[in-house]
Amino acid sequence: MRRLPLKKRLFCTFIELWLRSLRINWGNSVDMSNPGILALWHQDLFAATAAFRKSGLVAFISPSSDGEILAKIAFDLGYKVVRGSSSEKTLEIREVLRQLKEGNSCAMALDGPKGPALQEKPGTRWLAERANAPVYKLEVRYGAHFSLRSWDKAKIPLPLSKLTISLSYL
């Protein structure tokens, strides 16, 4: 991973501290002990990043400049990072497939890299089928938060707020 400029590194450190401040509670969830794919909506990206830190999940993150910042944060929080896009015919998805076949779980957004929000793209199911892996769908109940006016309506939990995370099979 290439070194970011100082301003971006400071921003990443601030975001990491904020994510570590969130209080994660686990709701009713399926057992995720079998390697599989953690499927989430883009709007829940921050919640998922906070909930699964230090888990060793393989995070499939966009090669965009926003993805560069998220990749740094995810790496610092204990994720294995693979940069690529399921919408482009990239070879990086094969690295995620290899990781799944080797027994590692991965995380990726159901609504693809560009949306529309909350509309499932075929990438997650394609990967699950190729790897013969289960898909665990993430659901989040937010305490204090606000939503951005971005394409994905990203939900931003306030520092120290409570998140309830549940997992079900997709």
Image: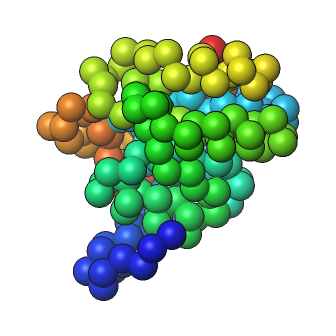
Q: In which quarter of the image is residue 165?
A: top right
Looking at the rendered image, the quarter that the C terminus falls into is top right
Nearest to the observer: residue 160 or residue 119: 119
Nearest to the observer: residue 23 or residue 130: 130
Residue depicted at 32% across the width and 40% down the height: 155
Residue 2 in the figure: left or right of residue 165: left
Q: Does residue 151 show up?
A: yes
Q: Is residue 16 above or below residue 140?
A: below
Q: Where is residue 77 in the image (x, y as percent from the top left)?
A: 58, 64
Q: Position of residue 38 (x, y in %)?
A: 62, 33
Residue depicted at 84% across the width and 42% down the height: 102
Residue at the extreme bottom: 6
Nearest to the observer: residue 76 or residue 167: 76
Q: Position of residue 39 (x, y in %)?
A: 56, 29
Q: Does residue 24 show up?
A: no
Colour scheme shown: rainbow
Q: Is residue 57 above or below residue 79?
A: above
Q: Where is residue 26 in the image (x, y as percent from the top left)?
A: 65, 38
Residue 38 in the figure: left or right of residue 152: right
Q: Quadrant of residue 81?
A: bottom right
Query: How many callouts does the rendering have?
Result: 0
Residue depicted at 64% across the width and 37% down the height: 94
Nearest to the observer: residue 105 or residue 27: 105
Q: Quadrant of residue 35?
A: top right
Residue depicted at 56% across the width and 51% down the height: 82
Q: Is residue 133 above or below residue 49?
A: above
